[in-house]
Amino acid sequence: MNIVRPVEVSRGKRAAGQELWQGIADSLPVMLGVTPFGITCGVMGLTAGLTGMETLLMSMLVFAGASQFVSITMLGAGITSWSVIVLTTLLINLRHFLMGASLAPYMTKLPLYQQALLAFGLVDESYVLTISRTGSAGYSPYYQFGVNTALYLAWVLSTAAGVLVGRSIADPLAWGLDFAMPATFLVLLMPRLVDRISLYVCWVAAVAAVAGALYLPGKWYIIVSCLLASTAGGILERKNSHAQ
Amino acid sequence: MRSEIILIIMGMALATFFTRFGCLVLFSRTGIPSFLQGWLQHVPTAILTALIVPGLLLPKGYLDLTIHNHYLLAGIIAAFIAYKSRNILATIGIGMAVMVTLKFLG
């Protein structure tokens, strides 16, 4: 361990630019999947009575698709209470606590301002790309920053496109481009399913996520299935180590 | 731009940032509790599964296990290609081609 460490660090420093580009390159398919959602967000903003600038400002500052869709729908329905919309946003985004905890072992070693900058871009897609890269090639803040930047630009620019020309485009979500996201995630998931415990975790998460998507509001199915499946994995891990 | 909308957007931005930064601030101070470490290693698999499966089985919000569900059909093919090739471009390329073909046919 002591011999390997300094080599890894120096390699890491030299490869900063390379990691940044790798992050951007790995984000390309997901950017494709984000685009129809951004366009839809722009169109929805105008339809709900927001101005183009207000809709764009929301994408630039909030950068959270699901909660933007919900709050825009609420504003369109005449719900303009600050506390209701902000609390709803908080609840929809609670799942990011889990992702933050998952990346914490790597990110807490960075200076706090870098943690804050990277945390701003912590969305579902950037989380799965970053944690997968961490598993295969080690954690790099430059890689994470590349992913964050690429996805942020895709979100803001596609929202702008939705605001500017969205109304002349027939429902962008009907194109099937959003399929790029589950397809990318499948390539990231498959290499993880190499042992029995990971397969159990995957099954528990799948069943819980489908049940949760059917019966729970909003994005709660992600939180509930993640908690259940990770806990099951943790328990199985402990049983295994006791048996040995 | 109206000020009440700006305030709502600022509030949403702060709430969202709190959920993304909160754990990092907490764990920067305390270190990561040891009971969490074994648990955290399964979070990526669990979240990936939770992001993929409902998207394929409930693309329109209700459970659709019929052949009319293009996301499920293309998803099964993409899963097979992902398993065999471990290649994002091949998986997305063929998956999207299946998706477009199904839309064109149906």
Image (spheres, rainbow, N blue to C red):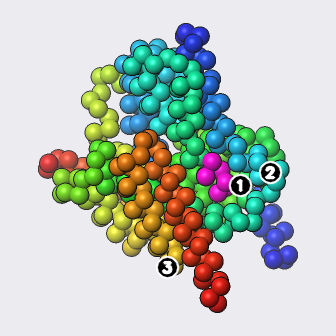
In three-dimensional space, the C-alpha distance between marks 2 and 1, rounded to whole angstroms, equals 8 Å
| A124 vs A242: above or below | above
**Cβ atoms at labels 2 and 1 below 8 Å apart:** yes
In three-dimensional space, the C-alpha distance between marks 1 and 3, rounded to whole angstroms, equals 26 Å
Q: Residue at x 30, y 27 (%)?
A: A169
| Mark 3: few/some/many CA within 10 Å (<14, 14-19, 20+) | few
Q: Residue at x 26, y 29 (%)?
A: A170
**Location of residue A22 in the rendering, given as x and y in whole percent from the top left corner:** 59, 54
Quadrant of the frame with the C terminus of chain A: bottom right
Amino acid at the residue labelled 3: Arg
Q: Main secondary structure of the magenta part?
A: helix
Point out which mark residue A70 bears.
none
User: Mark 2 falls within which chain?
Assistant: B
Discs 3 and 2 carry the same chain letter: no
Secondary structure of the residue carrying tag 3 is helix
User: Which residue is disc 1 drawn over?
Assistant: A104
Amino acid at the residue labelled 1: Ala
User: Which residue is disc 3 drawn over?
Assistant: A196
Discs 1 and 3 carry the same chain letter: yes
- In front of the other: A45 or A36: A45
| Mark 1: few/some/many CA within 10 Å (<14, 14-19, 20+) | many
**Range covered by the magenta-colored residues:** A97-104
Secondary structure of the residue carrying tag 1 is helix
| A68 vs A112: above or below | above
Splitting the image into 4 quarters, where does residue B88 fall?
Answer: bottom left
Q: Residue at x 56, y 47 (%)?
A: A95
- In front of the other: A220 or A57: A220
Splitting the image into 4 quarters, where does residue B15 fall?
Answer: top right
